Image: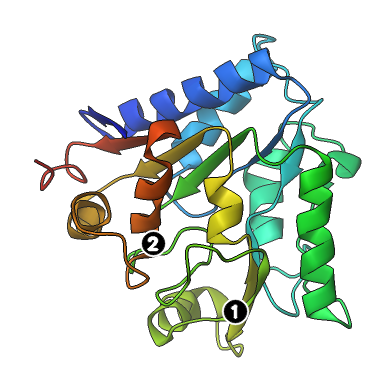
Amino acid sequence: MKITIVPDYDAMSLAGADRVTATLRRRPDCALCLPTGNTPLGMFKALLERIENGTLDASQAEFFLLDEYVGLDDNDPESLTGWLMDAFLKPAGIAPAKIHEMPTKAHDLDRAAAEYEAELQRFGGYELAVLGLGGNGHIAYNEPGATADSRTRVLTLTDESIEQARGYFEGRTVPTQAMSAGVQTLLEARSIVLLVSGAAKAEVLRAALQEAPTSNNPASFLQLASDKVEVICDAAAGSLLN
């Protein structure tokens, strides 16, 4: 596994943007996924600057959403899809037909998840999967307990994740389930980039990379695809790595 430790958040963001840029220049029409949360915001800013100045074209790519709360869609103010739309996809001018949302309002969620997985495979799977790291080791919304062979599915969120989300819902009931791309789905990507920032993620990152793969820390399963994984972290997040 390639581990790139850079001085700070800005350097991590630029390195992540470089990996996305290189992929889109090599395969303009590829399928890829991008994470939500605070970590990728700097990367998005760098990518948008490149799109605006004409040095990057993302319009041909197929963007598959990693996860979404069950019962929410991009019209909900707390939707993960809506967040990514506002943070990157809309400013980047990505056409709606190129955005593949999680079908979390379908009547038959299990069937819809399987159809979503099949749609991704029709596009050849992920050329690039850019992931963030949750405080409990989740990648996408694969919470502790997820298995290495899991596919796109509905899962129950941990109490920790529900509590972390509570501040965003402003008095509303926090969803207890999400639909997420599976661990195996992610591991099959031709290239995987894990972005990690901040001292608060240092221990979970160390455990993910330096202890045996375990469902207690789903990010540790990235070791199973180590030849195509690059971890890009700032010095604070990488402070405990050997």
Q: At numbered mark 2, what does the secondary structure look like: helix, strand or loop?
A: loop
Q: Residue at x 81, y 25 (%)?
A: 60
Which of the pair 212/163 is nearer the observer?
Answer: 212
**Residue 145 placement (x, y as % from top left):** 42, 77
Instruction: Give the distance between the C-alpha atoms of the residues marked 1 and 2, in whole angstroms.
Output: 16 Å
Q: Quick check: 61 left or right of 41?
A: right
**Residue 39 placement (x, y as % from top left):** 42, 47
> To which residue does mark 1 refer?
155
Q: Quick check: 215 left or right of 18?
A: left
Marks 1,2: beta carbons within 8 A: no
> To which residue does mark 2 refer?
134
Figure quadrant of the C terminus:
top left
Which of the pair 12/229 is nearer the observer?
Answer: 229
What type is the residue that disc 1 sits on? Leu
Within-10-Å neighbours for mark 1: few <14, some 14–19, many 20+: some
In the displayed structure, would residue 185 be above or below residue 13?
A: below
Q: Residue at x 48, y 20 (%)?
A: 18
In the displayed structure, would residue 241 be above or below residue 182?
A: above
Q: Residue at x 56, y 88 (%)?
A: 171
**Residue 82 placement (x, y as % from top left):** 71, 58
